[in-house]
């Protein structure tokens, strides 16, 4: 279990804990909210430090708690102001820990993606392959015209010996001989390329 998961679980347990409060139902005025904030600020900060493990984050969350309470304004009747402050603060801490956990998981996912080796060839290999292809094409262009035609029909267009024989008006054994010559010359050219590298 990660630290974020542990902190989140603790925070949820602390938030679920029953907080008793002394007080009667009242509509909170701005002055009362400010008074509550100053009265319980340190208490809330200590509680949140225990949940989020950071004094700075806890202080920010206490400020957010105050803002949330201000939004309630004089509209809502509050029976237990202290409990309400603690509930808002705990909920904010849980939300913070959840966001932290999901961003940590997203970051871990990105790290994992970066460690996967690329299937793409390196720029050097790509350059060598292009040079090799260019030299192979040059070798094919240097073949005698009939050998080149048989080679292209067979290797590029995928024609059978029979189809090539009909097209070139020669026998299948003649096609085989032309292809053997073309392959021999191509192999010699490739060997020369390999020796040069």
Image (cartoon, grey):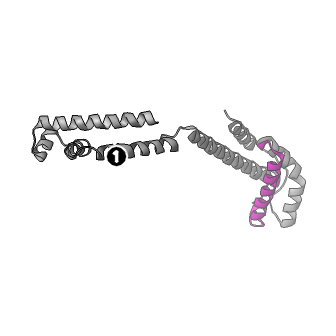
Q: Is residue 60 visible?
A: yes
**Residue 120 visible in image:** no
Residue 76 magenta: yes
Which range of residues does the magenta coloring cover? 52-81
Rendered residue at 58%/38% (across/down): 115
Would you say 9 lies left or right of 27 here?
left
Provide the major secondary structure of the magenta segment: helix
Q: Residue at x 18, y 35 (%)?
A: 177
- Which percent across, then down, holds residue 9? 69, 38
Residue holding disc 1: 138
> Looking at the image, which is closer to me, 143 or 65?
143
Measuring 82% from the left and 49% from the top, which residue is drawn there?
56
Towards the viewer: 191 or 24: 191
Q: Does the magenta run of residues contain 167?
A: no
Instruction: Answer few, some or many: residues within 10 Å of disc 1's Cα (few below 14, many 20 plus, some between 14 and 19).
Output: few
> Which of the pair 153/158 is nearer the observer?
153
């Amino acid at each position: 279990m990660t630290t974020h998961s542990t902190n989140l679980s603790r925070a949820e347990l602390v938030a679920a804990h029953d907080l008793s409060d002394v007080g009667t139902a009242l509509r909170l005025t701005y002055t009362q909210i400010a008074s509550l904030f100053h009265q319980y600020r340190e208490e809330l900060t200590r509680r949140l430090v225990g949940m989020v493990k950071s004094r700075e984050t806890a202080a920010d969350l206490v400020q957010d708690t105050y803002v949330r309470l201000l939004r309630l304004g004089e509209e809502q009747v509050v029976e237990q102001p202290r409990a309400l402050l603690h509930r808002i603060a705990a909920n904010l801490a849980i939300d913070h820990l959840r966001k932290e956990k999901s961003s940590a998981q997203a970051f871990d996912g990105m790290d994992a993606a970066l460690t996967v080796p690329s299937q793409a060839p390196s720029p050097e290999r790509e350059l060598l392959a292009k040079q090799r292809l260019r030299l192979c094409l040059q070798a094919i262009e240097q073949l005698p015209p009939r050998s080149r035609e048989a080679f292209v029909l067979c290797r590029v267009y995928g024609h059978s010996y029979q189809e090539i024989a009909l097209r070139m008006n020669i026998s299948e054994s003649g096609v085989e001989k032309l292809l053997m010559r073309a392959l021999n010359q191509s192999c010699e050219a490739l060997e020369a390329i390999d020796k040069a590298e």
